[in-house]
């Protein structure tokens, strides 16, 4: 444990697309994409585009799961 802090990892998942495709005409319509799937490999620009709906990852609802404690409590 460095500096007396516990290390925690957060699992982030991107869920349904919330992009309003009818905003330009004053309406509301989403495309029904249920979960973000990256179009390309991690670290590329394509990794930020959804393979299912073609929208940027920022349009998908971000869900952060509970913190996972990665520190060891045993001394050895």
Image (cartoon, rainbow, N blue to C red):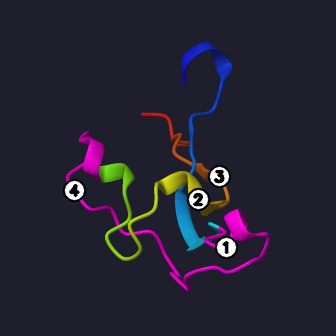
Mark nearer the N terminus (4 vs 2): 4
Q: Which residues are magenta?
A: 20-46
| Nearest to N terminus: mark 2 or mark 1 | 1
Tell me the distance, in whole angstroms, between the alpha carbons under discs 4 and 2.
17 Å
Quarter that holds the C terminus: top left
What residue would you read off at disc 2? Answer: 59
Q: CA distance from mark 2 to mark 1?
A: 14 Å
Q: Looking at the image, which residue is at 41% across and 74% down?
A: 53
* Residue at numbered disc 1: 22
Q: Residue at x 26, y 39 (%)?
A: 43
43 shown above or below 37: above
**Is residue 27 shown above or below 10?**
below
Secondary structure type for disc 1 = loop
Q: Residue at x 30, y 51 (%)?
A: 47
Give the foreground label among 2 and 3. Answer: 2
**C-alpha span from label 1 to label 4:** 27 Å
The residue that label 4 is drawn on is 40
Q: Is residue 7 above or below residue 49?
A: above
Marks 2 and 1 in Cβ contact (< 8 Å): no
- Asked which secondary structure carries label 4, the reply is loop
Q: Nearer the viewer, mark 3 or mark 1?
A: 1
Residue 20, quarter of picture: bottom right
Q: Quadrant where the N terminus lies?
A: top right
User: What is the distance, in whole Å, between disc 2 and disc 3 at their CAs?
Assistant: 24 Å
For marks 2 and 3 on the same chain, the one whose residue lies earlier in the sequence: 2
Secondary structure of residue under mark 3: loop
What x and y, as percent, mark residue 6? 63, 32
């Amino acid at each position: 444990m460095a500096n007396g802090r516990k290390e925690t990892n957060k699992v982030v998942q991107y869920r349904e697309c919330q992009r309003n495709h009818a905003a330009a005409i004053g309406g509301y319509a989403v495309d029904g994409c249920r979960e973000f799937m990256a179009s390309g490999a991690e670290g590329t620009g394509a990794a930020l585009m959804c393979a299912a709906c073609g929208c940027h990852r920022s349009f998908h609802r971000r869900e952060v799961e509970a913190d996972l404690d990665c520190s060891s409590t045993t001394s050895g």
